[in-house]
């Protein structure tokens, strides 16, 4: 596989613009207004360019777009024997040749087709970047530099540019040139070792958590850099100074590993997989019922007492050894057995009713069908409809987080390949 194809299949960048302009973006040129009926959005006025494909970079672009950034997604043209565009268009279950996942990952974006294998394509992208606030890229480190689009070059004509660089191992270090996927990042970051039953092979979560965690860290980095840019506005830098946001997949995973490293450093303890339990915090586990399973988090001191009373184990509720977490951890097998004995004699709905009434955290283990039918998801606008170009209505996850004054919104469906090429390029400054 040639380096260009590898890069397009594993890395991306993004650009956005929208009106009205917030004060911290007062020097940004907006290209489109907030759609009628949509409240002012937090990132209105921000211009982002998204290159690359698949998950990490585009998820960051999607998150910015949900809050008003006009994201211009640059995709490669079709080549002989290929479909062209982001490979995610062809991943998992397809409707009329396009993944329904595409409607999530690329909502609120515009699609522009440019061939970065050509100097003409790269020149056009540079012109787009010159007018952008943010560039999101997840190419293999060094790829943009080979194309004459490293940060030092781009920032000469756009000193306020913020470049989010997402890669497997970061832009520096001995592993920087290795290809990096979420599956490897989750393993290196410590997550994969903990997932599974003791003594058995580790399992994956079923979704690309490494990519998503990297994307969210990237969005945080972009917002921090925007704040720093605003603070750096001066006579010599009227738009403020940009910077590089370097996000590695493995580091994003590692950042979420809680006490993993401190416990090893202090005690030489290597945390082991524990199935559905939460080691060192008790009780917190999955428990069998007559018709399924529930998860119960009874690890707070007062919560534990309420839980034991609710299941008829007042003796454990009042046991002085179990008043605090260290004592409960020492007897976690006994506690789990008591809870399991109670749950396995009842249906899931019975367990939920009793423990919710006792203010004990409890929940069923949801499938996609459970999510789609749940009234709380609906009440929180976490299931929203979008319609594909051929008329199929698809439910997609709603906007997170919820902002009271400048909420996010889905203002347009995911674009067809190259749908916005003419419109976007016609707005470029000559």
Image: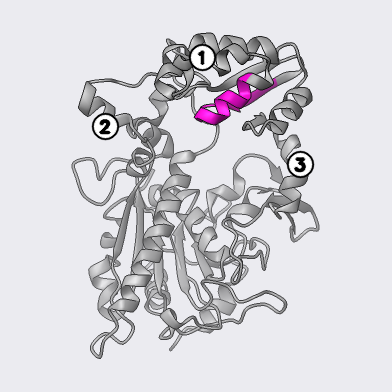
Q: Residue at x 54, y 13 (%)?
A: 335
Q: Residue at x 68, y 17 (%)?
A: 311
Which sits earlier in the primary sequence, circle 1 or circle 2? 2
**Can the viewer see residue 368?**
yes
- Marks 3, 2: nearer the viewer: 2
Reading the image, the residue beneath label 1 is 319
How far is disc 3 from disc 1 in space, using C-alphas? 38 Å
- Marks 1, 2: nearer the viewer: 1
How many other residues sit within 10 Å of disc 2, few (<14), some (14-19) or many (≥20)? few
Secondary structure found at label 1: loop
Q: Position of residue 193 (x, y in %)?
A: 39, 24
Reading the image, the residue beneath label 3 is 374
Which sits earlier in the primary sequence, circle 3 or circle 1? 1
Inspect the magenta stretch and tell me whether residue 305 lies in it. Answer: yes
**Can the viewer see residue 159?**
no
Q: Position of residue 24 (x, y in %)?
A: 42, 79
**295 or 63: which is nearer to us?**
295
**245 or 118: which is nearer to us?**
245
Horizontally, residue 325 falls left or right of residue 247, namely right
- Residue 32: quarter of image: bottom right
Image position of 154 with respect to 263: above or below: below
How many other residues sit within 10 Å of disc 3, few (<14), some (14-19) or many (≥20)? few
Horizontally, residue 44 falls left or right of residue 49, namely right
Q: Which mark is residue 84?
A: none
Q: Residue at x 51, y 14 (%)?
A: 319
**202 or 184: which is nearer to us?**
202
Q: Residue furthest left?
A: 174
Q: Which residues are magenta?
A: 293-308
Q: Which mark is residue 262?
A: 2
């Amino acid at each position: 596989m040639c380096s260009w194809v590898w890069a397009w299949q594993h890395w991306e960048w993004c650009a956005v613009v929208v009106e009205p302009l917030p004060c911290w973006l007062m020097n940004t040129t907006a290209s489109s207004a907030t759609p009628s009926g949509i409240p002012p959005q937090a990132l209105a006025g921000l211009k982002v360019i998204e290159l690359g494909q698949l998950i990490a970079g585009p998820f960051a672009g999607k998150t910015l777009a949900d809050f008003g950034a006009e994201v211009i997604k640059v995709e490669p043209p079709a080549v002989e024997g290929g479909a062209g565009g982001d490979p995610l268009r062809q991943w998992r279950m397809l409707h009329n040749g396009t993944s329904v996942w595409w409607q999530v990952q690329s909502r609120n974006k515009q699609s522009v087709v440019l061939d970065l294998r050509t100097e003409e394509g790269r020149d056009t992208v540079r012109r787009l970047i010159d007018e952008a606030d943010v560039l999101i890229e997840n190419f293999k480190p060094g790829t943009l530099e080979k194309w004459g689009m490293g940060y030092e070059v781009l920032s000469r004509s756009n000193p306020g540019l913020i470049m989010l660089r997402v890669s497997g191992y970061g832009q520096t270090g001995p592993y920087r040139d290795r290809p990096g996927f979420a599956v490897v990042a989750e393993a290196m970051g410590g997550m994969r070792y903990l997932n599974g039953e003791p003594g058995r092979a580790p399992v994956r979560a079923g979704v690309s958590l490494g990519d998503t965690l990297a994307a969210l860290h990237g969005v945080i980095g972009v917002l921090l850099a925007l704040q720093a840019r605003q603070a750096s506005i001066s006579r010599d830098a009227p738009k403020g100074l940009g910077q590089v946001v370097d996000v590695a997949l493995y580091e994003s995973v590692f950042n979420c590993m809680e006490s993993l490293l401190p416990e090893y450093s202090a005690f030489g303890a290597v945390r082991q997989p524990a199935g559905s339990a939460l080691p060192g915090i008790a009780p917190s586990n999955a428990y069998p019922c007559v018709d399924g399973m529930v998860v119960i988090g009874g690890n707070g001191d007062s919560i534990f007492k309420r839980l034991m009373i609710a299941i008829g184990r007042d003796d454990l509720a009042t046991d002085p050894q179990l008043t605090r977490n260290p004592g409960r951890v020492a007897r976690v097998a006994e506690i789990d057995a008591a809870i399991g004995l109670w749950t396995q004699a009842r249906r899931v709905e019975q367990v939920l009713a009793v423990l919710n009434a006792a203010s004990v955290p409890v929940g069923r283990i949801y499938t996609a069908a459970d999510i789609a039918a749940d009234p709380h998801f609906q009440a929180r606008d976490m299931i929203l409809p979008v319609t594909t170009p051929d008329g199929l209505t698809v439910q997609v996850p709603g906007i997170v987080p919820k902002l009271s004054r400048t909420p996010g919104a889905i203002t347009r469906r995911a674009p067809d390949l190259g749908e916005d090429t003419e419109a976007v390029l016609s707005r470029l400054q000559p």
